[in-house]
Image (cartoon, rainbow, N blue to C red):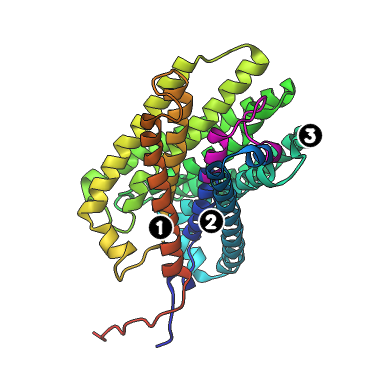
Amino acid sequence: MSPTRPSDTYTPMYFLASLGAGGLSVSFFMWLMFWLPHPGRTVPIFEDIAAAFQSGTPLKQAMIAAAMAGIALFVVLNLKSLLWNLSHFVAWKRTEAYEKFTKTNAQSQLMALPLALAMSVNGLFIAGLVFVPGLWTVVEYLFPVALSAFVLIAVLAFRSYGAFIARIKVEGGFNHAANNSFGQILPAFAFAMIGVGMAAPAAMSTNAAVVGLSIVASTFLLVTSVLIAGIALVLGIRSMLDHGTNAETAPTLMILIPLMTILGILMMRQNHGLGTQFEAHTSDAETFLFLAKVVSVQLVFALFGWLILSRHQYGKRFIWGRETSVMSYALVCPGVGFTVLWQFFVHKGLVAVHLVDKFSAVYWALIAVALLVQAAMVALVFTLNRRHFGSPRAVAAVPAE
């Protein structure tokens, strides 16, 4: 029996490996965003980072070096995984397995492709801010280019999801018994990821037309995402009540956590643009309350997902045990999503309304929560990459019946 590895059997859910790495690059960018001064800008750029490094203490310099190393490492892993997936995806589309795949509920998993593409564009933009000197001087020219890229990804996403919806609406065949997870929320996650990229110019551009276009386009993706997520949530819960949950797809029960992070950041970017260009300012208290609500939703679904995963002994079986599942990569996104939004909640919420003093003992205790979850996700990514892409191992022989 020849040695094999899980990734030798391709599935589009391996795009989640690229997605998770891209998300971790964003989590390291949060260090620079909230711990370094960047006057006059909503995000830090290369010049801000260089100035802080030159004038900083050894501890601050170590933090900056670690953040930049983390961003660089996970952007590279993100792109490496994306290219691997694209090459295997093209080959897989020519197989009979793909034809069978597109006749099942799993067809919606093809939305992992535009999801990963949108994440990579967002990650590359962050890498540009951090590593490219003088980028901010031409950033206004880059916003139309970025919006165009996200429009193309959106077209791909709507065509893919449209094919799925058209098939089940015309031919039928949607298997409600197999819908006992939140896997059908993945398309909503993809549209939200595209939308948050489209909303970036609203938070950074000084051109009213660009900001307005950014707000309108991202709102369309926001509404699309919310509608799909709402319907899929109800259908998924209905199926779970009838058929229980499946251990392998249980990680999808936490998909609402990263979805809320993406939608939350999308709306905050829109609010910033509305304030700077259209005089519709949002107070710190309103932002604090908004973030408190979004984090509360995350915690509810974290508890729900943890309960089900524990009952299935998911970690013992699929993370550290003999079984493997590509769906394990779906656990990275909730951890990264919580880490990123928690940073926003602490800084744009608690610190902004003066409930917590920045750099106080209470502040660091709260930040430690984000750092611990972030470290766990880093460990999880490397663990899963080793299990799925590492050295092939012999497959145990299956006795003939």
Q: Of the residues shown, which amino acid type is indicated by label 2?
A: Ser
Residue at the image point whose x is 36% and y is 30% from the top: 362
Which mark identifies residue 380? 1
Q: Earlier in the sequence, mark 1 or mark 3?
A: 3
For residue 195, which quarter of the picture?
top right
Residue at the image point whose x is 61% and y is 66% from the top: 87
Q: For mark 2, what is the residue?
A: 18
Q: Nearer the viewer, residue 90 or 51?
A: 51
For residue 398, which quarter of the picture?
bottom left
Q: Is residue 135 left or right of residue 124?
A: right
Span colored in magenta? 28-48
Q: Position of residue 125 (x, y in %)?
A: 66, 43
Q: For mark 3, what is the residue?
A: 137
Circle 2 — which element? helix
Residue at the image point whose x is 55% and y is 52% from the top: 70
Q: Using the image, determine if residue 271 lies above or below residue 104.
A: above
Q: Of the residues shown, which amino acid type is indicated by label 1?
A: Leu
Q: Nearer the viewer, residue 33 or 360?
A: 360
